């Protein structure tokens, strides 16, 4: 989901400057990963989410085949789908990023599900997530913990 510059400016006025210090973008080979975020959690009973944007500047498909993070023992790739009018999540083995294209893990679509959470996620902090790509290998990005009800990244995606 592309955000307008105007929306970004509005966010800039209501978010502390520290949030933008974490707007990192990591490029490795043909892959650029950006706008990684999650939501604060209450305790560790329920899984946390992981959202990010992945751009593929290469000439062939790239595949995200898994994620790893020290904050969760069982991170998985999920997809939210509507089935008979009800939202449901299913596990996916891989997420394909077509050549010269981008895919966003975002609310209502693909997302990381950080199961077996080892630590509460506190708003304003960051934690690393390593994305495992079939061709480009592991890419680690700092993930910003946004408020409990955040609906989108506080950072511009590198699209
Ligand atoms: Cu899920």
Image: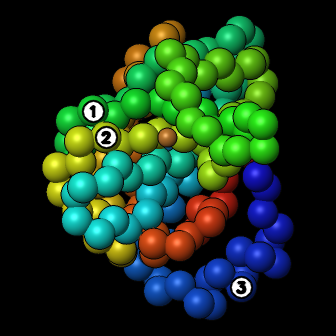
**Residue closer to the observer: 95 or 24:** 95
Q: Which is nearer the N-term, disc 3 or disc 2? A: 3
Q: Is residue 137 visible?
A: yes
Which residue is under mark 2? 115
Which residue is under mark 3? 10
- On whether ligand 1 comes within 8 Å of the CB at mark 3, the answer is no
Q: In the image, which disc is placed on residue 20? A: none
Q: Is residue 138 left or right of residue 99?
A: left
Q: In the rendering, at what x and y percent does residue 11 appear?
A: 65, 81
In the image, residue 25 sits, relative to residue 43, either above or below, namely: above
Say which residue appears at 53% left-offset and 48% top-offset: 51
* Residues packed near mark 2 inside 10 Å, few (<14), some (14 to 19) or many (20 plus): some
Q: Is residue 133 visible?
A: no
- Tell me the SS state at disc 3: helix
Q: CA distance from mark 3 to mark 1?
A: 36 Å
On-image quarter of the C terminus: top right
Say which residue appears at 70% left-offset and 44% top-offset: 86
Q: Are marks 3 and 2 in contact (CB under 8 Å)?
A: no
Q: In the rendering, at what x and y percent does residue 77 appear?
A: 48, 30
Which residue is under mark 1? 74
What colouring style does the render use? rainbow
Tag in front: 3 or 1: 1
Q: CA distance from mark 3 to mark 2?
A: 33 Å
Q: Are marks 1 and 2 in contact (CB under 8 Å)?
A: yes
Tag in front: 3 or 2: 2
Q: Is residue 12 left or right of residue 147?
A: right
Q: In the rendering, at what x and y percent does residue 2 appear?
A: 79, 55
Q: CA distance from mark 1 to mark 2?
A: 5 Å
């Amino acid at each position: 989901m592309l955000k307008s510059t105007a929306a970004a400016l509005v966010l800039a006025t209501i978010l502390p400057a520290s949030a933008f210090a974490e707007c990192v973008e990591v490029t490795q080979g043909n892959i650029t990963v950006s706008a990684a975020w999650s939501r604060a959690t209450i305790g560790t009973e329920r899984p946390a989410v992981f959202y990010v944007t992945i751009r593929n500047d290469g000439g062939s498909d790239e595949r995200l085949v898994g994620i790893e993070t020290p904050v969760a023992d069982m991170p998985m790739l999920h997809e939210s789908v509507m089935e008979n009018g009800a939202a449901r999540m299913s596990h996916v083995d891989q997420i394909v990023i077509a050549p010269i294209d981008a895919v966003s893990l975002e609310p209502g679509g693909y997302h990381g599900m950080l199961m077996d959470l080892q630590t509460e996620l506190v708003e304003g902090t960051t934690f690393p997530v390593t994305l495992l790509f079939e061709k480009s290998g592991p890419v680690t990005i700092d993930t910003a913990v946004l408020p409990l009800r955040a609906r989108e990244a506080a950072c511009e995606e590198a699209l």
